[in-house]
Image (cartoon, rainbow, N blue to C red):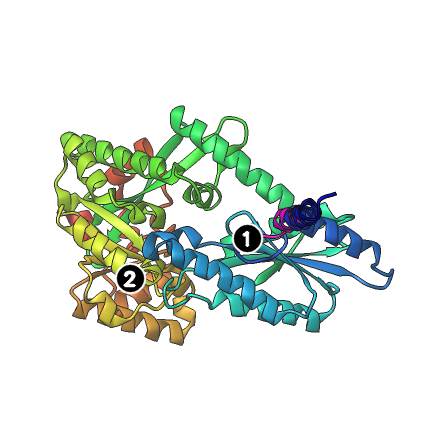
Amino acid sequence: MNPDSVADSMKNGVSDVMLQQILIYNQRHDPLTGLLTFPAFKDALTGMLADVRPDEEQAVVWIDLLNVRREFSLWGWDAAESLIRGVGLSLESGLARNTLIGRFGGRCFAFAVRAAKTDLAARKHIQDVVDTISRLGAHELDTTPLLSAGVAFYPSDASGAEELIRFASMAAGCARHTHGAMVLPFQHGMNNVLVRHHKLEVEIGKALAQDQFTMFYQPNVDLITGKVLGAEALMRWNHPEWGPVAPSEFIPVAERSNLIHGLFDFSLRSALKRARAWNRAGIAPGIIAVNVSPANLRRDDFPRRVRSLMEELPIAPMQLELEITESLLLDDEQLFAARMRQLKTIGVRLAIDDFGTRYTGFNLLKRLPLDAMKIDRCFIRGIHRSEDMRVLCRTIVAMARQMKLRTVAEGIEEMEELEVLQEIGCDDGQGYLFQRPLPMGDFEDFLRAWPKRSVSFGFEIAQAS
């Protein structure tokens, strides 16, 4: 054989082997981080589980990065890739050498360590590793959580590798709703929760199409005169098979999808229609308040949507109040301050809801175009039995007065609470003491009966008027 042919054959043979090795490596490793792909991670974990002794446990930790898309939107693809690589390097440096680590899809990581559910030291080490990752890019991502994380254990939680990975992922999915970076341990009820959430998401879409939602109204009462100043419009859902579904259950599910925008449209449209009908009938309920979700405010077209609905169903702009939860202001101060200024150009009233739950600073509040401040019910409940709460609410009322904001106490249920709120100068109040939320017809009956009923609360002025 020609020596040159032999050399070419050997060269080609070596190249083929190297190419095959490269192909195998690329199939088993993520090209961006060098970590294992899902099939390789699962195969390696299967082998590890086979070696677990009866007195040992194996833990798998699943991490979801929640803001890769936002990182890309704000800073570009290089920044998003840098964040992903940083997470991979942080895992490799924070875990023992030869620890099984994988990256799956665009934003998911997992690692496997020998750890028992009852081993507090091992659990703390896992949390420390996740805490380190959660601080990556914090200066760019404001206060929005970077990740959610879950952990599952073999054999106490799962019987095999795929189930162990799936349960850790399920726990991370549930941790997403806790708004923190705590590593959430898997619990078998989580599967039922996720199935319920999926069913709810499907049923919310059907409910919007089939007009299953209704609006209830709860009065807002002037605590000095007793006059009904307005009402908060509250969404209610009576499912044809499940019966009543609480807003605390279906609204968070809707917020994780585009369904929340349909819910807001329904709420605002219904409230505007009702206000117009009451105005024509001479039943003056005053200001109608509608709640706004964080997801609604994040949409660029949200102010345009409000304006469009008000042009379609016109009422005096100052008769509509949009209630914005306090926590939104701290999630993204610049975005929400800009949204509020845009909404204010329409002429609507703006209220900060659940005030006190996140301790928004005075300097931030005075820069916002607010009209009212609603004091969270946790400060009102039992205020007559707590001097600390009395002092705190007095301070809130004084601060609001400096900013020329009306104060609304939420959740008033006892006469003694009402008396304290009147004594400290709170302007308005809502709560079961006056009236639970009512459907449209019953609320109209309430408005007619209120002047006489108000006497029992000491509101002679309302009765006289």
Q: Which residue lies at the image location 50% right of the left edge and 53% below the top edge?
A: 177
Q: Residues within 10 Å of mark 2 (few under 14, many from 20)?
A: some
Residue type at mark 1 is: Pro
Q: Which residue lies at the image location 27% right of the left edge and 70% below the top edge?
A: 424
**Residue 92 sits above or below residue 80 on the image:** below
**Residue 228 sits above or below residue 352 on the image:** above
113 lies left or right of 265: right
Residue 231: where, in percent of width, then height?
Answer: 27, 45
- Membership of 234 in magenta stretch: no
Which residue in the protein does label 1 denote? 31
Magenta segment:
22-30
Residue 157 in sight from this viewpoint: no
Does label 2 or label 1 sit earlier along the sequence?
A: 1
Which residue in the protein does label 2 denote? 333
Q: Which residue lies at the image location 22% right of the left edge and 48% below the top edge?
A: 321
445 lies left or right of 106: left
To which quarter of the image does residue 198 belong? top right
Q: Residues within 10 Å of mark 1 (few under 14, many from 20)?
A: few
Q: Which residue lies at the image location 20% right of the left edge and 35% below the top edge?
A: 309
Residue 257 in sight from this viewpoint: yes
Dominant secondary structure of the residues highlighted in magenta in the image: helix
Residue 407: where, in percent of width, then height?
Answer: 25, 61
Q: Secondary structure at mark 2?
A: helix
Residue 392: where, in percent of width, then height?
Answer: 34, 73
Gap between marks 2 and 1 measured at Cα? 37 Å
